Amino acid sequence: MNQENGARRKPQYRLRTLLVVVLLVAVVLGGWLSWVRPRRAFEARRRESIARLDWTGKDAAAEYRTKQIKRAVEQFRYGERSTPSLAYAGINDGAGILNVDWVGVDQSTHVRGIEITGGETVRLSIESDYVEHDAGLLIFSTTLRKRDAAEKWPQLTASAKYQACLIIGENEKSNAIDVSIIE
């Protein structure tokens, strides 16, 4: 009788061991795929965003803007995806516009405005309705017009060096970059 029990236990033990090993491999593989898949999708979005940037045939200011955006996309990391990164801020004083470009994962990270410092600090709000974003890309853009914030605009035309950062939350800001002035 003991021999029969021993003969039955050996296959049952092997079957249980095999099931535990298969379950362990499935859990490890599932965890690995859930870690790798979003990172691969992020890298694909980064490559697509860089590929879509083109300044061919534009002026030097547009070339500079494109290079700044490309550099920001290249430096943007998956681990930093919850905080947008300001790529370009440029004032075209003759046209009365401020162009703002940033890199981020999605529009649910609400950018409330932009803060420009130099002499004084100027805060301009960014309305999400006016933010341009092509689905699948990491690049966001908006244009703020002089007529929308005329009382603040004269402060931005002084001969000071300006720095800008995005206002994300009450006390949260993005990286600071130099503001380009186009006459």
Image (cartoon, rainbow, N blue to C red):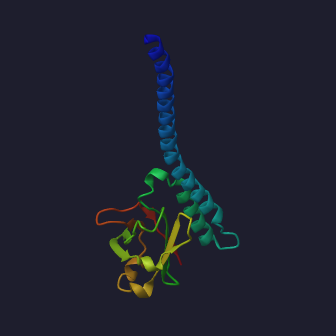
Q: In the current view of this chain or complex, which residue is farthest to the right?
A: 57
Figure check: 80 above or below 117: above
Figure check: 87 above or below 80: below
Figure check: 92 above or below 162: below
Q: Quadrant of residue 125?
A: bottom left
Q: What residue sits 41% from the left and 78% below the top? A: 127
Give the x, y percent position of residue 39: 53, 50
Q: Quadrant of residue 60?
A: bottom right
> Is 171 displayed left or right of 158 in the figure?
left
Give the x, y percent position of residue 164: 41, 67
Residue 94 or residue 159, whichever sits in front:
94
Residue 76 or residue 55, whichever sits in front:
76
Give the x, y percent position of residue 49: 59, 62
Q: What residue sits 52% from the left and 53% below the top? A: 75
> Is 67 displayed left or right of 10 in the figure?
right
Figure check: 81 above or below 36: below
Q: What residue sits 48% from the left and 26% below the top? A: 17
Q: In the current view of this chain or complex, which residue is farthest to the left?
A: 170
Q: What residue sits 70% from the left and 69% below the top? A: 56
Give the x, y percent position of residue 182: 53, 75
